[in-house]
Amino acid sequence: MEFVRPPALRPGDRVAVVVASGPCNQAKLTGGVAALEAYGLRPEVFESARTAGTVFDYLAGDDALRARDLTDALADPSYAAVMLAGGGYGAQRTLERVDWSRIDPAQPKIVVGYSDVTALLEAVAVKLGWCSFFGPMVACDGFHRGAGDFAFDTLMATLTGEVAELRFPGARTLVPGVAEGVTVGGNASLLASGIGTDTSLPATGAILFLEDVDEALYRLDRILTQLRRSPYTDGVAAILLGTFTECGEQEDVDRLLADRLTDLGVPVLAGADIGHNVPMQTYPIGVPARLDAEAGVLTLLKPPVA
């Protein structure tokens, strides 16, 4: 499938800041918005990003509020980008209520987030045919530091069309080889829990990226086993593995990843600096790319922005 690339981000562009999951850190949100303004953008914070838990303390407001904000932001052609402020849990609940009929697939815009936002990134690909970006969020990590922060700088370079490849000098080759395919993936637990829904984006013929956080080793085993037993990974072209922090001892995690993924007959590269608790590179989703598992390089065969 050919995904539509959004226009590159430019100074003066309007940016919608929303939440599809849980309440975000308000101090970090203020700092993140200031960082966007300092970059020359015009961020507008929606109610969902300011709302604490109401129905449940782990959800930002109710499902209707989050879905309304997300729908409004995606449907309004005056916004060049929709940046998620945070993750947590709740994006799949939000997707149940998004009014996709209001959103014009012919007017793609940048959509950025990671972790729980994986569900949304899959959805905009399936429902709208858009490329999107697994990248840092406005109220998370070091985003508030703005220019000079590695994750922030890498995100902006990607969204302005300056990034043609991602290099992973500290990565480990689990299975050597070179393969091409469209980039897909994200948080492994979200991908597994999305299987069977109308927004799941299978990895057939694709370069599949996986990462996760705070999953006991046996739960991570169950997630990976679900991905490989289902049709989700049928015909996958290659696998790129990011961070798996707080999932057990690194040696045990590495053994599990090798056990569950290296017999699929495709190149596998582990240890990419994408995911939780690391200054992360931004991973475009829906872009033709080539993974060289021995060189530790992901080359984008088309720019992720137009």
Image (tube, rainbow, N blue to C red):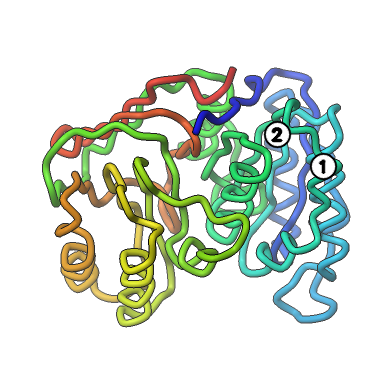
> According to the image, label 2 marks what residue?
36
Residue plotted at (63% across, 52% down): 120
Instruction: Say which quadrant the C terminus sits in.
Output: top right
Residue plotted at (53% across, 34% down): 155
Q: Residue 12: image x %, image y %?
A: 78, 20
Q: Few, some or many C-alpha atoms within 10 Å of disc 2 (few <14, some 14-19, many ≥20)?
A: many
Quarter location, residue 159: top right
Q: Is residue 69 above or below residue 217?
A: above
Position of 169 with respect to 139 (left or right) is left
Residue plotted at (31% across, 64% down): 228
Viewer-proximal residue among 157 and 165: 165
Quarter location, residue 108: top right
Type of amino acid at the residue the image marks with label 2:
Leu
Q: Is residue 236 above or below residue 264?
A: above
Tag 1 or tag 2, which sits nearer the N-term? 2
> According to the image, label 1 marks what residue?
73
Type of amino acid at the residue the image marks with label 1:
Ala
Q: Residue 304: image x %, image y %?
A: 51, 25
